[in-house]
Amino acid sequence: VRLIRDETTCRIEVTDSNPRMPVLQPVPPDSPSGHGMMIMNRQALAWGVDPEPEGKTVWCVVAC
């Protein structure tokens, strides 16, 4: 996990070794998991995925 902050925004990065790209898809409200991408999509000013040689980095920018 990496945090990069400036005066108005914070970029949050999470890197893992799984090469599978995340998929934004609807999740039933009562589902015990799978809500992370939906929360990020609703709250972030921007987000994306950067492929890495061994995995990926998922990032988002939020107001702070």
Image (spheres, rainbow, N blue to C red):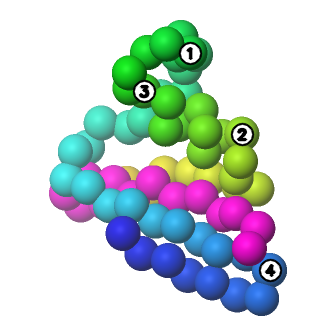
The residues tagged by marks 1 and 2 sit, at their Cα atoms, a distance apart of 15 Å
Magenta segment main secondary structure: strand
Circle 1 residue: 29
Position of 43 relative to 59 (above/below): above
| Residue 37 forms part of the magenta stretch | no
User: Is 37 left or right of 45, judged from the image as shown?
Assistant: left
What are the residue bounds of the magenta stretch? 52-64
Circle 4 residue: 8
Q: Residues within 10 Å of mark 4 (few under 14, many from 20)?
A: few
Position of 9 relative to 27 (above/below): below
The amino acid sitting under disc 2 is Arg
The residues tagged by marks 4 and 2 sit, at their Cα atoms, a distance apart of 18 Å
Disc 2 element: helix
- Return the disc, 3 or 2, that comes first in the chain's sequence: 3
The amino acid sitting under disc 4 is Thr
Judge depth for marks 1 and 3 and give the one in front: 1
Q: Position of residue 28 (x, y in %)?
A: 53, 11
- Return the disc, 1 or 4, that comes first in the chain's sequence: 4
Residue 42 got which mark? 2
Point 42% across, 75% down: residue: 2
